[in-house]
Image: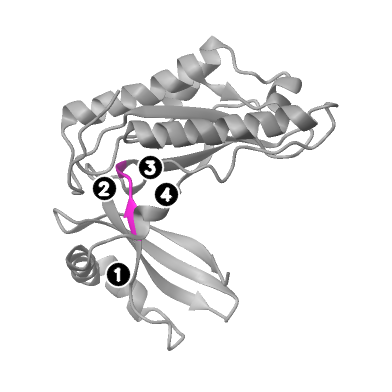
Amino acid sequence: MRIQQKGRTGVSSATDRQADIEMVRTAVTDHLKVHPRIKDQGHDPDGALRAELATTLPPLSAFGGRQFASVCVILDWDHQLPSQFYLLRVLASYDENDRERVDASVEDRDEEIAEINLYPEFDLPDYGEIEANESYVAVLRAGSTKIEDFRFLSPWRKQVGGAIADAAIRAVTKNPSYVRAATARRTDGLGGPVVIGWAPPCLANSESWAIEIWLLTEFDGHAGKARVFMVDPDRKVVTREYDTDVQLA
């Protein structure tokens, strides 16, 4: 299916969003790709588990005025035997070109895995580092459909326009919780709010895509903590906030 590209904004129609959500869920229930090491451990999910997993997965829809043209979902392993966690990778494409690129990358990885898959105890490559227009990773307990962690990984998320970023900064600095976090800091030189990038509605607890902003609250030169604020750029309000750990890369 081909789609018409539209300009990037924070909002898409309710019909488009629902179509994207259903496409992702169908990819899980009907077309889930399972890593051989998960199958070897007897954890290839049956139809009932796939349906439960599709329901547990957050509702995913394309950024702005775009729409998903195709979705590939892979249940990947953690390189442990027995596995402690599984990774559910969602690779969503906006158009045919990206779909073809993703399919080719997955097929190349399939061939690499098949070539060295001689014994069940051998380590095998996973499906990491395959990027799509939108890439998500859900971390699951092995043998469970409970999501322990969920992340949006697409590199373009950092491309926030200057005017939008400035408006989000102005909105967050007026937020009472931000003011409390900033004034409670005991260390000088931690700087002001930093725009991290776009965040999908399911992670921002918002109707549309939000801007993720961090305020460093502790840092010893190697590790620390930050207060994270999700800002709806249209309504200019904070929709979610929480603390996160920070480490020097």
Nearer the observer, disc 2 or disc 3?
3
Q: Are marks 1 and 4 in contact (CB under 8 Å)?
A: no
Q: Amino acid at mark 3?
A: Asn
Q: Which mark sits nearer the N-terminus, 2 or 3?
A: 3
Label 2 or label 4, whichever comes before in sequence order: 4
The three-letter amino acid code for the residue at tag 4 is Ser
Q: How is the image coloured?
A: one colour
Residue 44, x across and y down, in percent: 64, 18
- Packing grade of label 1 (10 A; few <14, some 14-19, many >=20) is many
Rendering coords of residue 233 (x, y %): 19, 56
Asked if the magenta segment contains residue 119, the reply would be no
- Image mark for residue 133: 3
Q: Mark 3 or mark 4: which is in front?
A: 3
Mark 3 or mark 4: name the one nearer the start of the chain: 3
> Badge 4: few (under 14), some or many (20 or more) residues near its Cα, within 10 Å?
some
Tag 3 or tag 1, which sits nearer the N-term?
Answer: 3
**Distance of mark 1 from mark 4, alpha carbons?**
27 Å
Q: Considering the numbered disc 3 on the image, is that residue within a helix, a strand or a loop?
A: loop
* In front of the other: 61 or 242: 61
Image disc number at residue 201: none
The residue lying at 28 percent from left, 74 percent from top is: 179
The residue labelled by disc 4 is 154
From the image, tell me which residue sits under label 1.
Answer: 178
Query: Dots 2 and 1: beta carbons under 8 Å?
Result: no
- Per the rendered image, the range of residues in magenta is 197-201
**Separation of residues labelled 2 and 4 (CA atoms):** 14 Å
Circles 3 and 4, Cβ within 8 Å, touching? The answer is yes
Q: Position of residue 90 (x, y in %)?
A: 46, 34
Element assignment for label 2: loop
Type of the residue with mark 1: Tyr
